[in-house]
Image (cartoon, rainbow, N blue to C red):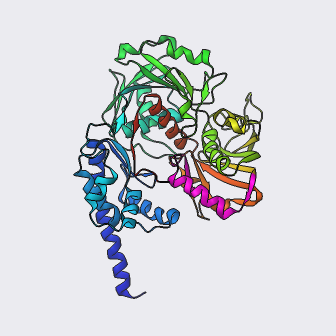
Amino acid sequence: MTQQKLDTVFEEWQSNEALAEEMIPLLGKLYRQYNIVSSLFGRSLINQSVIRILKDHRFVKKVEGTELSVQDTYPLVKAMVDLNLGPAHVDVGKLAVAFKHSGESDVVAFLKRELAEIVDGHGGNGSTGEPKDVVLYGFGRIGRLLARILIEKAGGGNMLRLRAIVVRGRGDIAKDLEKRASLLRRDSVHGPFSGTLSVDEEARTITANGNVIKVIYADSPSEIDYTAYGIDNAIVVDNTGIWRDEDGLSQHLACKGAAKALLTAPGKGDIKNVVYGVNHGDITADDRIVSAASCTTNAIVPVLKALNDHYGVEHGHVETVHAYTNDQNLIDNYHKGDRRGRSAPLNMVLTETGAAKAVAKALPELAGKLTGNAIRVPTPNVSMAILNLRLNQATDAAALNDYLRRMALHSPMQKQIDYVDSAEVVSSDFVGNRHAGIVDAKATIVDGNNAVVYAWYDNEFGYSCQVVRILQHMSNVSFLAFPKERD
């Protein structure tokens, strides 16, 4: 490559960097002023760095086969700011590709047609629902990640207001508050909190990016009156795992100011186990207690649904290679569960999982067709599900992968299914991924009717994103999405 060519490549990179820098405040304005949640083929553009935006543009070529750069998306973002748009989710990447393929030259005219329902609609009908108070009962791994996501989304008007967290009292309240805030501020897996945090010991609050969060100390739900803190008609998210049946979770509903409860674990009995994107439509206005199922169930059900809808699943086995959890021991010690007493950082631990049976609660058509097992491994986060399936019709790896790629990009489950086609990815590459599961195309094996599909999942963050989606649905918060998917 000549020096002139090298200079040209570098100049093009600098030009793209400059446009990405100019794009960031425009995306922020759309988000905070107009409640426009912008994305690029499903990847959020909100609060992203210049490099992240550039990398996401590169991602489009890998999965869609279409060259896309900020030179293509910047004019659309710039024009959107001047259209006085109503609240919505807008995939700028898909709009940019559609604009390129249209052969048109007038960006404004194109956007006015594609976004006609929300143009000049600021404060209009692009979204539904009323602001909803949210309480996090428990503040462990999932609780703190839910807090991060809710705080992040507060600026976009998703109308879920994190009002309080409930924890057990631990002696010195001032010291406890500082420790709670510190755990929210710093995370060994997910990195630092994106923003500022402050503690008010007298008021017993943590203020995160302007969101004032009351810290309520209680040993049981019966001790709490949420209305005493100005909280009413709230959804209580129980992420303690202590109660998983209706009787136990009903304790939350007995509290003044609490309207509904959402469990971040598989529910028992008649509690609906919901995988958002698959069976969230089963939630009715009368449902006061709902389960968000497990992280593994969320990871596998969307992929299984996609495969069953297209190929049919005769039977199969799900093997989960799962990161260790707080339920295991750091060193060998007594544990009521089989094998879980052995040191989590030092061993692969074969254990049981109810995920395969739980699939039937979200996908009744697969009842009795799946078995499952799990191996806990010495990594702190990101797991993998191996779906060994007998399909009703024969196919090959290329066709199956192409189908799942299209499901990840263009189906109603695009927020649940992600897709990667690289021979070099490893578990840590998926920390912070917001999808329920990520299909690893390079690992797919197909022999006629037999298929083995590998799906990665961030069992903490990806699952927490699914929980927030259920929260939005339970609160009747919904947004129009653009561009409209075409058949």
Picture coordinates of residue 288, whole percent (x, y): 52, 20
The image quadrant that residue 154 belongs to is top left
- Looking at the image, the residue that sits furthest to the left is 82
Q: Residue at x 74, y 27 (%)?
A: 336
Q: Residue at horizontal 43%, vertical 28%?
A: 475
Front residue of 344 and 439: 439
* Foreground pick, 420 / 325: 420
Number of marks drawn: 0
Q: Residue furthest bottom?
A: 2
Q: Quadrant of the N terminus?
A: bottom left
Give the image location of residue 106, x and y in percent: 26, 63
Residue nearer the viewer, 291 or 97: 97
- Does residue 151 sit above or below 58 in this rendering? above
- The range drawn in magenta is 392-419
Kindly indicate the quadrant of the structure image that contains residue 481.
top left
* Residue 405 within the magenta-colored segment of the rendering: yes
Name which residue lies at 66% across and 32% down. 361
Q: Nearer the viewer, residue 269 or 263?
A: 269
Residue 36 visible? The answer is yes
- Residue found farthest to the front: 487
Q: Position of residue 26 (x, y in %)?
A: 27, 53
Q: Is residue 36 placed above or below 244 in the rendered structure? A: below
Horizontal side of 185 relative to 400 (left or right) equals left
Check if residue 413 falls in the magenta segment. Answer: yes
Residue 230 location in percent, x, y?
Answer: 34, 17
Which residue is rendered at x = 24% and y = 50% of the image? 83
Task: Tell me if residue 170 can be seen.
Answer: no
Q: Is residue 393 left or right of residue 106?
A: right
Displayed quadrant of residue 205:
top left
